[in-house]
Amino acid sequence: MVPRPVPPHFDDEPVRSSQYQDKRLAFLQPRLDRRKFLKLMAGAMALAATHRIGAEPLASAPGTYAPEPSSDLPGWQGSLLIDGESLAHWTVEHDTGASGSLEVAPGLLGQAVQLNWNLGSGAWVQGRYTFPTPVNLSQADIFALSLQGGGPGEVANTVSLMFADVNNVFYGANMEGKSSGVNQIDRWLINLPIPKAAFYFFFAFGDGTQIDWSRIDRFFVVVKRPASALGGGAGQLRIDQVQADTAANWSRQTEFFRATTTSQAASKAIEYLLSQQDPSTGLLVSWQEEELENPPPKAWLYDQALALIALTREGRFTHGVPANAAAQAARNLAGLLIRQQKSDGHWSRTWNPRTGAELLDDRWVGDQAWWVMALAGYANKFGDPSAMDSAQRGADWLVSQIDPMGKVVVSTEGNVDVWWALLATSRLADAEKIKAYLLNATTVWDPNLRYWWRGFNDPAIAMDAATWLSAFARHPSVNQPERGQAALSFVRKTLLTISQDGSLCGFDGMGPVSIWFEGTAQYVAAGGEDAQTFLEMLISQQNPDGSMPGSTENWSSDAFGWLTTWRGLAPTAWLYFAITGPPFPAPATFLPLILRGV
C-alpha cells in the first residue's frame, strides 16, 4: 500500500473546466443481461452468508455478510456500447517512441479487450474503438466502463477516456495518476461512472471545439504520462462493458430510511475511541497500525472532531465535573486543542499524538470546520464558555475565507463543512451565503442528474458530497429534503461496489474501487435506501476491540483516493453515528435519524 499523507475522506479534489449538456437517452445497443450482472455483484454473497438480515451479527471477528439483493441491488446498468468480447473494430495507436498491442483476455463478463502498452520514450498509447456506424449519444448523461490494471509493479500513469465525433472533435476525461494510477490496481473496477459533464474539450483536427454527441464515431482508452518527467514503463489494462445511460431518469427515494440494531456496536465503538486517547497529550491516534507501518502515528483534526462529537454525545457531567469516561476524554481533548489554537483562529491539521508535536498546518477548511462544529457542540452541552469562545474564533477565521460567490473553497464538501460550523456557532447570515451557493444550479448542484458535484467545475461523484449535503438539504433552514433524497439515490447506484472476494457489498467514496466503511456508514446515517442492509454489513465487520477498518482492502489512486485495512477513528466514529444518528447540529426533530437499539 502507498501511504497517503491525508486521511481517507475526500476533500481536496482536483478541478478543471468542463462543459455541461442537457441529456436524454436513445441507444440502439441491447442492455446488459440483468441476471448476469446480479450474479456478478451479489451471487457470491447469496450463497456464502454467515448471517442474514435480522440475525445477530457475528460477535467474535469480521466475517462474510450476505444481504439478499433487492430488485435494483446492486448498482446500475445502462445501454451497452462496447461489450469487449472481441477485437472487432479495435485498433491500437501510439506516440513516437511508444508501442502497444491488443488481445482478448478474461473479462468481467465473458471476455475483455486487453491493451498492452510500453510508453518507452513516448507519451501515450491508446486503444481505439470505431463504431460501425456513428452512434447518437446526445441524450446520454452518464457513461461507465470496467477496468483492470496490471498491478502495483507498474509505474503510475494517467488513464484517459475519449469520445470523438465525425468532425474530429475530441472530448475526454482523465483519471490522474501522478503518484498512484488506476493502472496499478489489479482488481476489476466495476462500472466506473463518469458523468457526461466530466468530458471536456481535449483537442480537434479542425476549427471546431464543440463535440456533436449525436454523431460519435470513436471511443478511446488512453494510457499516458501524467507529466513529461513522470510515468512511463510498460503494462496492461483490461477494458470491458462500456455503457451509457440517462441518470436523469433514474428513480429516486422519496423518504429517508431508518436502520435499527440491538447489538452493542455503538458502545464498543466508544470503548475503542477511549482506548486511542493518549493520556499524556489528550489526542487520539487516527490509524492504529500507522504507528508501526508508517510512523510517526498521527492525530488528524477531522478525526479528533469526530471523536469529540461522539464523546460529547456519550458524556455526562455532574455539577461541571465529568461523570463518566467519555466526558473526561472529551474535556481532555477539547482543552488541549483550545490551547493549541493559532492566533488567527485556525488550528494545525495534524499532530503526533504521543508527543503533541505539530506535523502539518495546511489550513484545510474542511477539518477546521468540523472541529469548530464539534467544539461548539461540546460547549453547548456542557456549558463551557472557553470552548465556545474558541469555536467562535475558529468561526471568525472560516468567515474570512468566504468569497463573493458564497464559496469558501472549490470542494463541495469543504463548503458544506463550513456551513455546518457556522450553523453551530449561530453565524446565520454568513451561513446563508454558503447555502445560496450550494443550492445554485450554476455552481455545484446538478438539476438534471440531481446530485452535488464534487466541486466547482468538477462534476465527479463523491460520497460525502451526497451524504453530508443530504443532511444539509433536509435541515429546516434549507427545507429541500427531495434534493437530499435524490443525491442519496444517485450514489446508491453509482458508488455501490463489492469487496474483491465478492463476499461484501457496500460503497466507496469515489470510483468505486472497493468498500469504504466510513462512506458506507455515512450513507446509513444519512438515511439512504437499504440502510438496514448496509448497517448490518458494517456491524459484521466491527473488530472485537470495537474498531472499524477503513476498508476490506488496501488500494491507492490519485483519481479515487486511498483505502486501507488499518483500524481508524473515522470509520469507527461513523459506525457510531450510523447507529445513534448523524453528527451534525440540528433541531431535536432531526436527530436521531437512526434509532439506537437497547
Image (cartoon, rainbow, N blue to C red):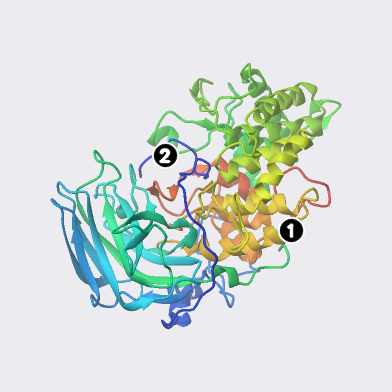
| Residue annotated with mark 2 | 4
Give the left or right position of residue 445, taking residue 153 as reference. Answer: right
Q: Secondary structure beneath disc 2?
A: loop
- Of 340 and 98, nearer the camera is 98
For residue 265, say whether it is visible: no
In the image, residue 488 lies at what x, y percent?
63, 60
Q: Horizontal and vertical percent for residue 378?
A: 75, 32
- Residue 35 placed where, x, y %? 47, 82
Q: Which residue is at the front of the view, 387 or 323?
A: 387
Q: Is residue 368 above or below residue 9?
A: above
From the image, tell me which residue sits under label 1: 481
Q: Residue furthest top?
A: 343
Q: Is residue 176 left or right of residue 543?
A: left
Nearer to me, 360 or 283: 360
Q: Quadrant of the C terminus?
A: bottom right
Point out the frontmost of discs 2 and 1: 1
Closer to the chain start, of discs 2 and 1, is 2
**CB of mark 2 within 8 Å of CB of mark 1?**
no
Q: Residues within 10 Å of mark 2 (few under 14, many from 20)?
A: some
> In this orientation, which residue lies closer to the viewer: 416 or 328?
416
Q: Residue 182, how many percent across, how many down?
A: 34, 53
Mark 1 lies on a secondary structure that is helix
The image shows residue 89, relative to residue 318, as above or below, that is below
Q: What residue is at 40 percent from the left and 34 percent from the top?
A: 292
Q: Is residue 206 visible?
A: yes
- Amino acid type of the residue tagged 1 in the rendering: Pro
